[in-house]
Image (cartoon, rainbow, N blue to C red):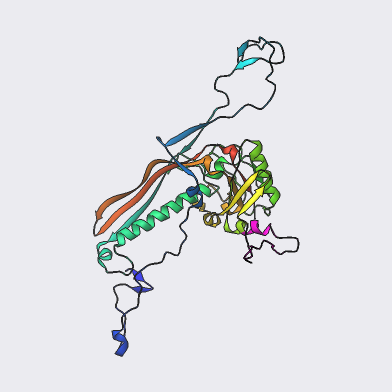
Amino acid sequence: MATTGGRDIATPRAGSGKDASNREDLANFISMITRDETPFLSSIGKSKATNIYHEWQTDELTAPGNSRVAEGTDFVVAGGSAASGDGALSVTAGGNRTRLGNYTQINSKVISVSGSRRQIDQAGVADEYAYQLKKRGTEMRRDMEFDVVQTYNKQSASGARKTGGFQSFVNSGDTCVFKGAFTAPSTTNAGTHVITVASGAAKASLALTDIDSVMQKIYEAGGKASRIMVSPKLRRDFSDLMVSDTGVRRNIDEDGKLRQSVDVYMSDFGDLMVVPNYIMGLAVNTTDATTTQFAAADSCALVYDPQWFAMATFRPMQEVEVGQKGDSTVGMFVEEWSLEVKNPKGCGAVYGLQ
């Protein structure tokens, strides 16, 4: 039997004397006390997937070097003999193009509401089915954010397909800093491997030099990050790095307000907006980890530019009303999507933070 406020909804309140006639004073609304933001997914763009394996291409310029040629030099196709002189005009087919891809993932939430529940006159709820439908849709969007920012989520076609998350594509020493016992996986920037460390592995505190190093690496790789996303704890740690030598923050506004946080970090290679993500502070869902070896999202700082990511939708979120099952109305939310990482080398991270 369903309950509300610890009381069976079908059981009347007990009372005697003058108290027996008192009406309940129950406000006609329900406050949702859980956060519902999706900081990462809300910051990136959208695109469309047309197959369960969504692919895209990257390209890069060749490194600057000698391209001088002698007057009248002819060109040669790559693989042929070069002309004499300082250089030769060569034609290369395809260049430095690389194909990347990610599997689509199906997320779903089921709703089942009995006929009696829909008929009860409830405070704050006009229709229990509609209320649960909206609630489950919000929960599913949070699940998708969880899948993107958790480190163990690598793409997989076996069983329930999984789309590779941020850290499965951004995990190379070319643009990342690894602290403590954390190291890059055997295959990097491909969405197929994630960082794995033993439970309880050594970590280290966040330092500004870590952020500066990542920003320099990204700059040298041709990118420019604009955001750093961290867990609530690391958000506080980041602000604490701005403490003066005397241990007192001195950033006081003209109106006398003492600012206790840092919203933008101005590095040598561009400004970074500091964005907290409460989902990165949640415990890792170990049911998706192959072993107890994984790197929790609260131990990393993600440095990126939203333009390099997109949520590629294969089947947009939709309500599927299954209909009646016995005396209950059954429905579901379903969406199929993939994370598109357009430029893994244009993003970075600090891994192994405590």
Note whether residue 188 is visible. no
**Which secondary structure is most common in the magenta stretch?**
loop
Tell me the residue at 62%/65% (across/down): 255
Report if residue 243 lies within the magenta region: yes
What is the x, y in percent for residue 176? 64, 43
Whether residue 157 sits left or right of residue 72 in the image: it is left
Which quarter of the figure is the C terminus placed in?
bottom right
Which residue appears at 69% of the width and 45% of the height?
Answer: 268
Q: Position of residue 9 (x, y in %)?
A: 31, 72
Vertical arrangement, residue 144 with respect to residue 123, above or below:
above
Tell me: residue 139, above or below residue 9: above
Can residue 245 be seen by looking at this rendering? yes
Taking the spot 27% from the left edge, 69% from the top edge, the residue there is 121
State the residue in front, 269 or 315. 269
- In the image, 34: left or right of 270? left
Which quadrant: the N terminus?
Answer: bottom left
Front residue of 30/43: it is 43
Q: In the drawing, does residue 336 fall left or right of residue 339?
A: left
Determine the residue located farthest toward the right in the rendered image: 245
What is the span of residues highlighted in magenta in the rendered image?
236-260
The residue at the point 59 percent across, 39 percent down is: 346
Q: Position of residue 143 (x, y in %)?
A: 45, 52
Residue lying at the far front in this picture: please name it: 254
Q: Quadrant of residue 260?
A: bottom right
Percent coordinates x, y for residue 285 in the rendering: 50, 53
Q: Quadrant of residue 113?
A: bottom left
- Would you place residue 215 above or below residue 82 in this image? below
How many numbered markers are drawn?
0
